[in-house]
Amino acid sequence: MAPPRTDQHVRYSVRLDGEEPGTAHGIDINDRGEGTVTEPRLYQLIRQPGPITDRTFEITFLDRGIHTYVFTFG
């Protein structure tokens, strides 16, 4: 993901099965699912502990202009 310009940031919120991710949060969000895109790079949003199961992932961008290129799972 990348912000629209280098001097802008884009806030986002992540949910896992409709809830805050808690201990399943990745390094680029907090346990409440809040994060900010500050530079163009790969962002780790979820790191699911324990056995892998089917989950529903949601991301909401709170600011305009985000550039997303690819989402990977697994």
Image (tube, grey):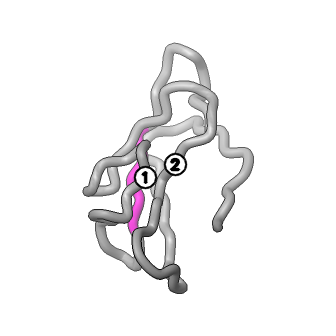
Q: Which residues are magenta?
A: 11-15
The one of 43 and 18 positioned closer to us in this rendering: 43
Gap between marks 1 and 2, in whole Å? 5 Å
Q: Secondary structure at mark 1?
A: loop
Residue at 49 percent of width and 34 percent of height: 37
Q: Secondary structure at mark 2?
A: loop
Prevailing SS of the magenta stretch = strand
- The percent coordinates of residue 14 (x first, y second) are 41, 59
Quarter of the image with the C terminus in it: bottom right
Residue at 64 percent of width and 65 percent of height: 73
Q: Is residue 8 above or below residue 65?
A: above
Q: Is residue 36 above or below residue 26?
A: above
- The percent coordinates of residue 24 (x first, y second) are 37, 64
Q: Is residue 72 left or right of residue 26?
A: right
Q: Is residue 24 left or right of residue 47?
A: left
Q: Is residue 42 above or below residue 16?
A: above
The quarter of the displayed image where residue 21 is located: bottom left
Question: Circles 1 and 2: CB distance less than 8 Å?
Answer: yes
- Name the residue carrying label 1: 26
The quarter of the displayed image where residue 40 is located: top right
- The percent coordinates of residue 60 (x first, y second) are 46, 56
Is residue 44 located in the magenta-colored stretch of the structure? no
Q: Is residue 3 left or right of residue 17?
A: right
Instruction: Check disc 2 and give the amino acid type.
Output: Gln
The one of 25 and 10 positioned closer to us in this rendering: 25
Residue at 62 percent of width and 40 percent of height: 42
- Name the residue carrying label 2: 44
Furthest residue in direction top, as rendered: 7
